[in-house]
Structures are given as C-alpha cells and as structure tokens.
Amino acid sequence: MNVLITGAAGGLGRAFANECGRRGYNLFLTDVNEEGLTCIKQGLERRFGSVVATATCDLTEADSVDSLLSIIDKYKIRFDMLLNVAGLDFEGEFMKRDREDLVKIVLLNNAATLRITHAVIKRRKPGRPFTVVFVSSLASMFPMPLKATYAASKRFILDLAVSLRHELKREDVNVLTLCPGGMVTTQKTMQSIKAQGFWGDITTNPLECVARNTIDRALAGKSFYIPGILNRILTFCSRIIPRSWVAAVIYWRWNNTQKKWLNS
Amino acid sequence: MDTIVITGASSGIGLETALLLTQYGYNIIGIGRSEYKCKQANEWIISKNPKAKIKFYLADLLHQREVVRVAEQIIQYLNENCNGKLHAIINNAGCVRSWYMTTDEGYEHQFALNHLAGFLLTYKLLPALIKAKGRVIMTGSESHKGIKINWDNIMLYRRYNPLVAYKQSKLCNMLFAKGLNERYAAEGIHAYVVDPGLVNTDIGNKETGMLVNFIWSLRKRYGVSPAVPAKTYAFLCEQSPPPDGLYYYLCKEKKYSRQVTSQNADRLFALSERLCGIQYGKVQKL
C-alpha cells in the first residue's frame, strides 16, 4: 500500500505516518519543514523498517507542487491512499490578524488541498481502490467567532469532501472526512488546551487513537469520523440550535480562553 | 579540574545538584531548554557561590538531532579545556506527559527524554568518559518497581497511560545503568541510578493536563527540597574509589526491581541502539 501524507512532519501528519509505518505501508511524506521530514523518515526506518520517501514542498505554490509531481512521475510512484493533513491556523480576532496571514489560511487549507488532491487521485494505482482522507475539524460544524477564517476554511473542506465522495464513488474512491476536536499536537496546542481548563481536557482527543481509527474507518469505506462522544453530542446540538446563538456562545467562551492563553 | 555534565540543570534537582557540585569545586556544564531559565539558573548559582565554574548549553533533548548537536559542542569544549576528559554525566532531564506526544522522530516523549536522550548523549560522550574513568548517573525513581517492560509496545502506543509510561522509562534507566556497567566496567566506567525520593519540583506541572497537574500539585507538597537528593549525586561523584552499587537513595545502596536483569538490559540496548542509530560495545565478562 502506497500512501502520500501532506503536512507529515508534525502533529496529526506525523501521527498518521507512525500509524502507517506500524501497518507496514510504504510512505511518501511531504511538508514545508525539511528538517522535520528527515527526522520522521529516520524514526520510521529505525522503528518499523518502513520504506519512506520524502520531498519538501510548499503546497501553496503551484511550482513547488509541480516539482513534487515530477519526482513522483520520474520514479513512477502510484498511490493507494492520500491523507490531506497540511493546514494552519492563526488564533485571534479577525481585524487584529495580519491580512496576508488570513489569506494564507485559505490558500493552504483550501486551494492547496484541492491542488494536491486532484493531482494525487490522477496518480492512483490503476485498477485498485483508492482512499482519500480530508482533515476538516470540529470547527467546521459551527460558525466560530475569533476563529472565523479557520472554521470557514474547514467548512469548505467538509462540503467538498461530502460532494466528492458521491462523485468518485463509481470510480472506487472512498472519501472520509475527519472532524477532530482539540488534539495535543505541539507544546503550543497543549498550552491552548490547558487554558480552556475543564472543557479543553474533555474535548481533547488522543492523537494516536484518532490516527488509528481514521485509517481503520477509511479502509472500511466510512464517510465521516468525529472522534469522541462529547464532540458528537456538540455536533448534534449545533444542528438544532440556531447558528447565531451558537456563534454567541462560542464567542463568549473563546474570548475568555484566548485572553487567558495569550496572556499566559 | 574535573568536569561534570548535568542535563535538565536549569531547575529542580538538576539545579541544586549543579550548585552543590560547584561548591565541591567541579566545573559544571549544564544543559537546559529555555534560554531565559538557563540564564536565571546561572545567575542564581553565581549568587550562591561566586567562585562557581558553570556554563550552560541550550538544547531540547527530546529531539535526537539536538542531543547530537549539543554533544558535539561539549566534546569540542572538553577537548579545548579539559584534555578531552569528562568526570561524570548526570542524565537528569525528564518529563511527565498526560497525552501521547511524539518527538520529531515520532518517538513518545517520556520514553524519548527520560531514556533515549541519556542513552544517546552518554554514547556520544563515552570517549571522554572512558578517558577519565568517569561515572554515568541517572535520575531514577522508586516507581521503576512493580512493572515490566512492554517489549511489543515500548512507547505504549496502544492504551497510553502516563504513569505507566513514566514508570517504564525509569525502569529503562536502571537497565541502561546495568548494561553500561556490564559493557564498560573494564574501561573504568561506573553507572548509577539515584532515587531522589519524593521531591518538591515542577516536573508534573509542566505541560501536563488538569488531572496530572492537580495530583502532582497535591503530592509535591510532601516532597523534600531538591537539595536533599543533590547530596547523593555529589556522593557518587566524590567517592574514591567509586562505589560498586547500582541504585542509591540518600547516599546508601538500595534494593531494586527483579526486572533489572542482564537479559532485559541486553534487550533494551539492542532496541535503543536501533532507535538511535548507534552501537555500544559488547558485554565484557570480568
């Protein structure tokens, strides 16, 4: 099984790489962080004896993706699975963010995801089933003041994935959307979760379990995965409560949390 | 003047040990993660002991490339200033985590920092240690008892339990010390593990979740000052000839787990060597 993972040098991407390594899959890892890629490649080879190829790539640059694809074509690598993990967020109020930072969220989370997905599905192994995982977020379920751009970009992914699933069904492609809550991916996210106190602790999903369950479900042909019972309940509530109310509650909560976190 | 390397020297047990050892006249190389805390620690030690010879290097030992980088810096320093000799290394840096988190290599944090970092750093500094017939001291814990190494799942990928991960990493420290003695006693190396007892430090409050944070905040109140275990480290560095024991508490030898066997040590060495991409020497029969 040949798997391509974007954003593989950190957080969820690295957790997916570990999970695939454990399962004995062959990996093609990309990220902007070259040093991180070298480290995880070394770790996977030493730990599982995995076959790992890496290529540094800035997915927001069409040229960078083209050179990535030329490497893939040169070695005639064809894939069975794509894990779209690369994404980013800048916390805080819309008007206090740098303008270009905001645009970058959409460029990476949306435009770049489209670009790589289109390219990799074209490079699937002929005659074999193909699996795509999109990493959306619990944030895609709600309008989220103070995380407005990020939440909207994740909503884009969610809608895209649900549509693509139907479009590609006949071609034996399974599309799964992952909508996780908070995960302890870096020391920074750990501080953010700490700042949320009780709610942060209970909506946090263990990274390694999310990675394992996502791949299990994707291979079983499932369409959707929200880790954690509480997160599923929150999602359900968001569907029956008016969106403006949800936005008000979230604004109140994040405003407090972010103040605490940014001041810490 | 004899030189000693201490990891995790900017706070807690490492800091007090660094201070005490400067008072014994050792030249100390401390390793810490935060520039600010290292600077503070340096100033604090100088304020307590104006004659202290101390120097800090910055490194986040969670990640192996950082371990290798700082090891190279230290070797260069030792070659230039200490005839390439190192009297002792104290592998003290450690962490507690509430969640399964991974290093850049994808290794679990507690296993990576509490065991692998010391395993790799000691390997890199081994030539300097052998030159001085030096000592390797690990910060262990009584919690290494009552547990076996989970060989099939050493990073506890399935069912991560923070306490089990911590206990296991401390058992790894014991096995590492035992394995080192079996491999390098002929070269004059002595490896020890210190049980600091319950000490009032911030280990359980750094980057942990609410539950671990809360429990540790309650528990540490009953802990002794880090100056108490510092004496045991100083004892192990000072004694001549070096004592023969493996596990020490309050300057006295203590019984350790029955899991600390040569067989387990060999197995841990083989696994850790693979994960670090290094190869220690063979076991020598004395």
Image (cartoon, coloured by chain):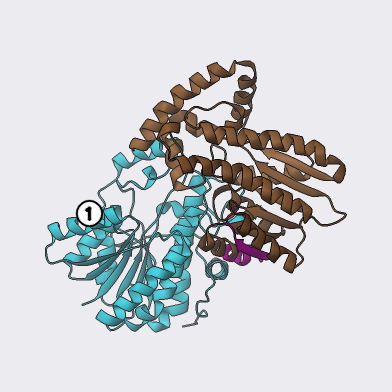
Is residue B74 shown left or right of residue B121?
left
Q: Is residue A128 above or below residue B222?
A: below
Q: Where is residue A238 drawn, in percent x and y?
A: 61, 21
Q: Nearer the viewer, residue A221 or B237?
A: A221
Q: Where is residue B96 drawn, in percent x and y?
A: 43, 48
Is residue B30 shown left or right of residue A237?
left
Q: Residue furthest left?
A: B50
Q: Nearer the viewer, residue A78 or B103?
A: A78
Residue at screen point 53% across, 34% down: A149
Is residue B191 shown left or right of residue B237?
right
Badge 1 element: helix
* Chain A palette colour: brown
Q: The N terminus of chain B lies in which quarter of the figure?
A: bottom left
Is residue B61 shown left or right of residue A163?
left
Q: Which chain is cyan?
A: B
On the image, numbered disc 1 is attached to which residue?
B40
Residue B75 occupies quadrant: bottom left
Q: Is residue B150 above or below residue A222?
A: below
**Number of marks in the image?**
1
Residue at screen point 49% across, 20% down: A249
Three-letter amino acid code of the residue under disc 1: Gln
Q: Is residue A57 magenta?
A: yes
Region rendered in magenta: A42-59
Q: Is residue B37 above or below residue A194?
A: below
> How crowded is the residue under tag 1: few (<14 C-alpha within 10 Å), some, or many (20+)?
some
